[in-house]
Image (spheres, grey):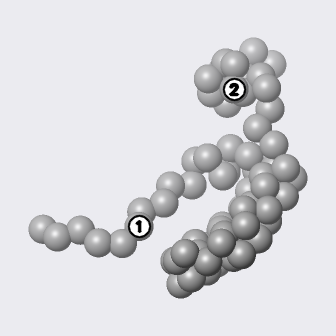
Amino acid sequence: MKGGGIRLGSPSVTTRGMREPEMEQIGAWITEILSNIGSAEIEQRVRRQVAELAGRFPIYESRMTRGSVHAERASV
């Protein structure tokens, strides 16, 4: 068997509350970066856009310290 491509998981984005539109944007960024390998300008722009998106969907401190969303829900 010969593997190829990129496999992406969704748990880290769905935990933040992201849905299909955000995943489409993430896919577009990946495509843009791979289509322009070595372009510092594009890398910097995409990095800023990713940071802005992540800022709209923060990981809460309680989730990080407890290790999972399930632990947080169990304590509610």
Secondary element under disc 2, as helix, strand or loop, is helix
Where on the picture, by quarter, is residue 67? top right
Label drawn at residue 65 = none
Residue shown at the point (87%, 53%) measured from the top left? 56
Please name whichever residue, 15 or 51, is drawn nearer the observer in this view of the structure. Answer: 51
How far is mark 1 from mark 2, CA to CA? 26 Å
Where in the figure is residue 58, as x and y percent of width and height?
A: 81, 43
For residue 62, say whether it is visible: yes
In the picture shown, does residue 35 fall above or below 68? below
In the picture shown, does residue 53 fall above or below 59? below
Quadrant including the C terminus: top right
Where on the picture, by quarter, is residue 72? top right
- Answer left or right for 64 relative to 38: right
Please name whichever residue, 26 or 43, is drawn nearer the observer in this view of the structure. Answer: 43
Q: Amino acid at mark 2?
A: Met
Where in the figure is residue 24, as x and y percent of width and height?
A: 66, 74
Residue shown at the point (66%, 52%) measured from the top left? 13
For residue 53, say whether it is visible: no
Q: Which residue is under mark 1?
A: 6
Q: Amino acid at mark 1?
A: Ile
Secondary element under disc 1, as helix, strand or loop, is loop
Please name whichever residue, 64 or 74, is drawn nearer the observer in this view of the structure. Answer: 64
Q: Which residue is under mark 2?
A: 64
